Amino acid sequence: MNLSNPDFNVAQFQRQDSLTGLGLGRLKPELYKQRSLEGEEGGRRGGGCGRLNFILRFDCDLEQLIVKIHKAEGLPAKDFSGTSDPYVKIYLLPDRMTKHQTKVHRKTLNPVFDEVFLFPVAYSELPTRKLHFSVYDFDRFSRHDIIGQVVVDNFLDLVDFPRETRLCRDIQYVSTDGDLGHG
């Protein structure tokens, strides 16, 4: 094709191209989607990004909330390999100074953490506090991807609380992690 030919008309070529339906010379972004983005889209539609299993208990003698993160199930794939490298950050809001974090579990969508964390807090303060779990995908060379979050409040309304209370909650999709205290 001679582009210097004055008879060459781009509009005519585009019209002819759309008539043939071949789409020659056009990129089709849907062919180049990363697997992680597809998983994210599916999670957004369903409102969840897997489930988080954990146990809460309050030790009245020591005045501390005991949190055991047991496992996560059905996490979306965030890596090209079709898996994720998940870990969980935990805050007892509104305090963002005290942060706990699980170990990173490599190449899994169903990590078993079995880690225990302690938050010193008076029983009388529990109605004003929220437990915030943020599930992340670890990335060695770039910013870690947020998978989703679980927020637990109204501790005193939980059935067995302050005794050991087993909970399983859907991990909710988060559109941005700018306000989650990433780092």
Image (cartoon, rainbow, N blue to C red):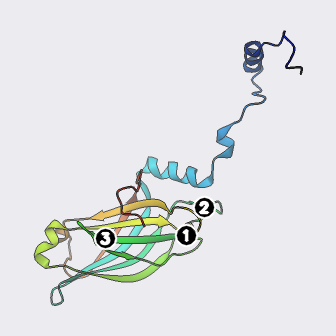
Whole-percent x, y for residue 67 in the image: 31, 79
Q: Tag 1: residue type?
A: Asp
Query: Quick one: SS at disc 3?
Result: strand
State if disc 2 and disc 1 touch (CB < 8 Å): yes
* Nearer to us: label 2 or label 3: 3
Q: Secondary structure at mark 2?
A: loop
Mark carried by residue 79? 2
Neighbourhood count class around disc 2 (C-alpha, 10 Å): few under 14, some 14–19, many 20 upward: some
Q: Earlier in the sequence, mark 2 or mark 3?
A: 2
At 77% across and 26% down in the image, what residue appears? 22
Dot 2 amino acid type: Asp
User: Quick one: 123 or 10, which is closer to the camera?
Assistant: 10
SS at mark 1 in the image: loop
Q: Residue at x 50, y 74 (%)?
A: 111
Left or right placement of residue 112 versus residue 94 in this view: right
Label number found at residue 85: 1
Name which residue lies at 78% across and 28% down. 24
C-alpha distance separating marks 3 and 1: 20 Å
- Observer-nearest residue: 117 or 152? 117
Q: Which mark is residue 69?
A: none
Return the residue at label 3. 91
First in residue order: circle 1 vs circle 2: 2
Identify residue type, mark 3. Tyr
